[in-house]
Image (spheres, grey):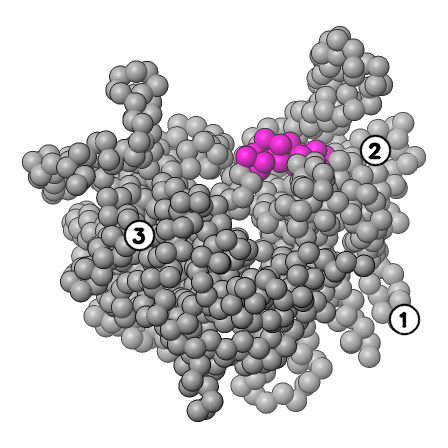
């Protein structure tokens, strides 16, 4: 146990077998508390499956996921979320028929049981938290607007705010800048960077410029396992990574 | 769904309520007995429609088996009434038992001798049955069309069960209530029926407010969240199974109350309440009235049933055609229903088309309520 | 041994009716995610088609071939129900793609209309209408390319429709004269009598079985084999399977998913028609005939899982055999010395309708262990 407490999250020898296709193959990964970690990899490297395993959506064929010293294998998604794993999806997924405020209310509300939700008003602390979050992602003016009417970038930010509202110990962020303008991308990178330190964040993305801007440790995934780890410069000069991304010259 | 577009001010609301209550109180004097009875029945159907709206309109679960819970409520009240007026029959048990040579009351009838137990059973038994069925289904993430056909299959299974059990509950003949007695009066008598009408009207309003309270805050929002994106709800840390089971159970309870009221007003409960068409009809009341608008469910139930009785009196064969077309039309052209269309930008769009009001360029709520800015 | 064989045969007979009825429903559900509540009414159309074919074969000129009318009616029923299904797909279901619950409600509306149509329109006029529709819609398909491309095409079309209407009126006349001669004019419930060679019993391994039951098993067998061949061998079959597995990708690869939908729905509906023929051999045909079978079909679909014919086949025969075992109380025959409380329970459920109750309970229990049916689709699913 002591071995694991040093790390917030450890994935040990994870293998996911989809009828003969190994989406993940003996994947090992450890993340320290407070770390900002980026995961990159070509298409089909298993990035999304990797998130699915942590959040309980996919059960690995073998291996262990240890989070805060507790095994996550076999736990239901909502239990894992309550333990402190928050996830932002690839395409923004917010509740489109609810307003910005209502979306955030749902993520901030605690405890997450029916009785608490039946109480008429959210408690004051949580309401303040919501207004704070709306300020962070710059949606205060739009609190009454249905999330479905927001622009793509605003939806991305609302989802990030919802993620923060859950106060997770570990934030899993899947392609947060897909479809954003350059300016929005920069803002998002700054936002995530400012969150690191207090929060442990794991970011999955394709966008190299964005990853460089994050200035974090990077893990490269290929064919279901970790190819190499290090900072951006190390990665970019690593021969194996170059081979994977550019194709091995014959 | 969007509750802010049409807003009545306090005065209009007050007058509306005064008129409504005055009408309810005076209805027995205004309407002939036959019409009053019909209105009472339709009002009781509005309660089951509210339940359908809660699970379908808000939570996205299309149940085609509400008839189960409706009928269970009806049987509960009918069993009490039968026992209450069986003293003159052989063995002091309801008359029909003698037909099948049953001499002892089946065990499960016994608690229905108590009026208090019956009052609870009417809604509690359907709620528990719905809860168990719902939990077993939701637990395995069975949803969408699968859920619908499973509920329909269970409806037919219950129908088969009730239809076949002569010795337990008089099988296909059902239980009559109009010739039974309550407080020394025949249940079918004008006096009792008048009180039942008032109780029905009161319960419709109570059920309406209860449903409104339920969906108003975060609880309602989570139901909408489940309807629109269930995995997201799960990853936010909520367990959808619990919420779905609760709301399905509540809709079962509403159906039970509705069935009990309907039974005492129609004078009989029988497995016919559990036929497939009746349960699907409940959905169309809500669809036409406007799903996700509770008032729409009430109005839909009352007006469609009223239309049904009018058309059936005049041209019996054509109702099926009308109803069939209604199903097709409402889902293809007016999926939000009439009230949903009124609440949304429907009328506004219509007026804009003819140039009566200015077009909105940005978000309606920003342009229409200037006060919300800032 | 004899008992077992008897039970097996009965189970397979019940199962094959279920299978033929559920086959079309399952194919459509697998491909489009749509449950067609009008499926039972398409079966009804097939059953009435059988009756009408039977009437026509009583004409003096066709009398010598009377024995074979059932075979002809299978093809006719397939075409009639198939065409009605295609009309349904093109007018309503296509509009509701992506909202399966709404489709469910709309098809229920269709089933109400079809039922009432049969109730209020005399059989002869109904036949006339269907005949004109069939000819009107199908005739242009046989025009030569030259005609199709000429500017006068619309006149040709008009001509073919007028021809269709004419034939429709004539056939309505024919049927009504036949009905007045041979049947009761206003009866909604009609009886199909099997030709002589299909009546009676047949002896296999010392047991006697009704021939009609055997015929239904054969019809089912042939339909299943035909469908499997179609799905596996023909170009459209492979396209259908492709769309079943990944609709978007198929679209990108240039498969017209619209055409695939129409063809699948047409075939599914046509199979309902064939099921109608089978059902008409079992009992009298009325407006509600389809409704009696639809819930059995649902149970098959739920138990079998989506997108896998094998699941449908296993589920049908499984339910069929269970129905016979429970409904006829055969468990008691197999195990006569059963302890009392258990045997009482078995007796309680030993009717056809109570067997349904028991089987449903068993299915719900089964779903607790295997929520997606007997043969679930595995692998990486598109995010739902």
Residue at x 59%, y 31% (from the top left corner): C91
Q: Position of residue B202 (x, y in %)?
A: 17, 50
Q: Position of residue C142 (x, y in %)?
A: 82, 23
Could you tell me how far apart the alpha carbons at marks 1 and 3 are, in whole angstroms?
79 Å
Identify the image quadrant of residue A146. top left
Identify which residue, B106 or C27, lies in the foreground: C27
Q: Position of residue C45 (x, y in %)?
A: 67, 38
Which residue is under mark 1? C205
Residue at x 87%, y 38% (from the top left corner): C66
Name the dominant secondary structure of the magenta segment. Answer: helix
Q: Is residue B174 visible?
A: no
Which residue is under mark 2? C57
Disc 2 is placed on an element classified as loop
Residue C167 is inside the magenta segment: no
Q: Are marks 1 and 3 in contact (CB under 8 Å)?
A: no
Could you tell me how far apart the alpha carbons at marks 1 and 2 are, in whole angstroms?
35 Å
Which residue is under mark 3? A137
Q: Nearer the viewer, mark 3 or mark 2?
A: 3
Q: Given the image, what chain letter belongs to the residue carrying mark 2?
A: C
Indicate the quadrant containing the N terminus of chain C: top left, top right, bottom left or bottom right.
bottom right
Could you tell me how far apart the alpha carbons at marks 3 and 2 are, in whole angstroms?
77 Å
Q: Given the image, what chain letter belongs to the residue carrying mark 3?
A: A
Q: Nearer the viewer, mark 1 or mark 3?
A: 3
Residue at x 35%, y 52% (from the top left corner): A158
Image: magenta residue range: C80-95
Identify the image quadrant of residue A83. bottom left
């Amino acid at each position: 146990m002591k071995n694991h407490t040093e790390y917030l999250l450890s994935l040990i020898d994870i293998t996911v077998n989809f009828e003969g296709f190994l989406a993940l193959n003996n994947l090992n990964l450890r993340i320290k508390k407070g770390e900002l970690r980026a995961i990159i990899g070509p298409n089909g490297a298993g990035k999304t499956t990797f998130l699915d395993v942590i959040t309980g959506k996919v059960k690995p064929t073998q291996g262990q996921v240890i989070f805060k010293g507790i095994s996550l294998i076999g736990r239901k998604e909502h239990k894992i979320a309550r333990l402190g794993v928050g996830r932002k999806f690839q395409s923004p997924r917010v509740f489109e028929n609810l307003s910005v405020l209502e979306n955030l209310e749902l993520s901030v509300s605690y405890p997450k049981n029916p009785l608490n939700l039946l109480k008429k008003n959210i408690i004051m602390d949580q309401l303040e938290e919501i207004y704070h979050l709306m300020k962070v992602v710059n949606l205060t003016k739009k609190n009454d607007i249905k999330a479905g009417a927001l622009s793509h970038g605003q939806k991305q930010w609302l989802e990030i705010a919802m993620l923060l509202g859950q106060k997770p110990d570990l934030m899993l962020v899947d392609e947060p800048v897909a479809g954003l303008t350059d300016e929005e991308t920069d803002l998002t990178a700054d936002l995530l960077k400012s969150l690191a330190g207090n929060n442990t964040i794991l970011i999955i993305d394709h966008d190299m410029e964005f990853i460089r801007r994050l200035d974090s440790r990077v893990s490269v995934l290929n064919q279901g396992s970790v190819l190499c780890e290090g900072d951006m410069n190390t990665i970019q000069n690593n021969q194996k990574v170059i081979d994977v991304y550019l194709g091995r010259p014959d | 769904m969007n509750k802010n577009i049409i807003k009545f001010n306090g005065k209009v609301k007050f007058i509306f309520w005064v008129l409504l209550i005055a009408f309810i109180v005076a209805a027995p004097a205004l309407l002939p007995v036959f019409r009053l009875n019909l209105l009472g029945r339709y009002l009781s159907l509005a309660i089951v429609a509210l339940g359908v709206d809660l699970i379908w309109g808000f939570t996205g679960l299309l149940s085609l088996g509400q008839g189960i819970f409706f009928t269970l409520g009806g049987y509960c009240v009918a069993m009490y009434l039968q026992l209450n007026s069986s003293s003159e029959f052989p063995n002091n048990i309801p008359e029909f038992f003698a037909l099948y040579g049953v001499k002892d009351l089946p065990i499960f009838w016994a608690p229905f001798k108590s009026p208090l137990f019956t009052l609870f059973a009417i809604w509690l038994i359907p709620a528990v049955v719905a809860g168990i069925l719902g939990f077993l289904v939701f637990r395995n993430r069975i949803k969408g069309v699968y859920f619908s056909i499973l509920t329909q299959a269970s409806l037919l299974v219950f129908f088969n069960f009730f239809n076949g059990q002569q010795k337990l509950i008089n099988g296909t003949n059902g239980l009559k209530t109009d010739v039974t007695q309550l407080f020394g009066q025949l249940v079918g008598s004008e006096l009792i029926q008048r009180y039942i009408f008032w109780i029905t009207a009161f319960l419709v309003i109570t059920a309406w407010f209860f449903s409104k309270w339920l969906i108003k805050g975060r609880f309602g929002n989570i139901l909408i969240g489940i309807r629109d994106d269930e995995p997201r709800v799960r990853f936010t840390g909520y367990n959808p199974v619990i919420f779905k089971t609760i709301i399905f159970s509540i809709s079962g309870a509403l159906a039970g109350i509705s069935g009990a009221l309907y039974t005492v007003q129609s004078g009989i409960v029988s497995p016919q309440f559990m036929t497939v068409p009746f349960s699907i009809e409940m959905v169309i009341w809500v669809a036409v009235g406007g799903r996700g608008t509770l008032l729409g469910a009430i109005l839909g139930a009352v007006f469609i049933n009223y239309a049904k009785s009018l058309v059936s009196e005049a041209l019996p064969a054509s109702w099926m055609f009308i109803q069939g077309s209604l199903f097709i039309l409402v889902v293809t052209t007016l999926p939000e229903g009439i009230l949903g269309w009124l609440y949304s930008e429907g009328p506004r769009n219509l007026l804009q088309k003819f140039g009566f009001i200015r077009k909105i360029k940005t978000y309606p709520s920003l342009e229409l309520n200037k006060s919300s800015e800032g | 041994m004899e008992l077992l064989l008897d039970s097996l045969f009965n189970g397979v007979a019940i199962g094959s009716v279920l299978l033929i009825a559920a086959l079309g429903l399952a194919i459509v559900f697998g491909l489009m995610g749509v449950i067609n509540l009008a499926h039972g009414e398409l079966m009804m159309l097939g059953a009435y088609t059988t009756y009408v074919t039977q009437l026509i074969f009583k004409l003096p000129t066709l009398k010598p071939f009377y024995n074979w009318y059932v075979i002809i009616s299978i093809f006719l029923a397939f075409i009639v129900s198939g065409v009605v299904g295609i009309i349904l797909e093109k007018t309503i279901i296509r509009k509701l793609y992506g909202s399966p619950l709404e489709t469910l409600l709309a098809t229920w509306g269709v089933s109400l209309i079809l039922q009432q149509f049969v109730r209020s329109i005399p059989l002869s006029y109904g036949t006339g209408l269907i005949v004109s529709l069939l000819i009107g819609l199908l005739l242009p398909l046989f025009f030569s390319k030259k005609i199709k491309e000429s500017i006068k095409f619309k006149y040709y079309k008009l001509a073919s429709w007028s021809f269709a209407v004419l034939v429709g009126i004539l056939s309505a006349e024919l049927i009504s004269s036949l009905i007045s001669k041979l049947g009761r004019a206003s009866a909604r419930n009609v009886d199909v009598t099997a030709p002589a060679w299909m009546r009676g019993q047949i002896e296999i391994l010392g047991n006697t079985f009704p021939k009609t039951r055997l015929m239904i098993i054969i019809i089912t067998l042939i339909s299943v084999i035909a469908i499997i061949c179609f799905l596996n061998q023909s170009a459209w079959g492979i396209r259908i399977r492709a769309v079943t597995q990944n609709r978007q990708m198929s679209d990108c690869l240039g498969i017209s998913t619209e055409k695939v939908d129409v063809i699948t729905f047409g075939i599914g509906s046509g199979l309902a028609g064939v099921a109608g023929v089978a059902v008409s051999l079992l009992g009298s045909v009325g407006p509600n005939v389809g409704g009696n079978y639809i819930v059995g079909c649902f149970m098959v679909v739920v138990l079998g899982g989506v997108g896998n014919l094998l699941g449908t086949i296993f589920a049908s025969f499984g339910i069929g055999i269970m129905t016979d075992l429970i409904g006829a109380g055969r468990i008691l025959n197999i195990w006569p010395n059963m302890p009392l409380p258990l045997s009482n329970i078995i007796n309680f459920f030993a009717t056809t309708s109570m067997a349904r109750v028991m089987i449903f309970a068993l299915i719900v229990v089964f779903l607790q262990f295997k929520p997606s049916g007997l043969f679930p689709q595995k692998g990486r699913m598109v995010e739902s």
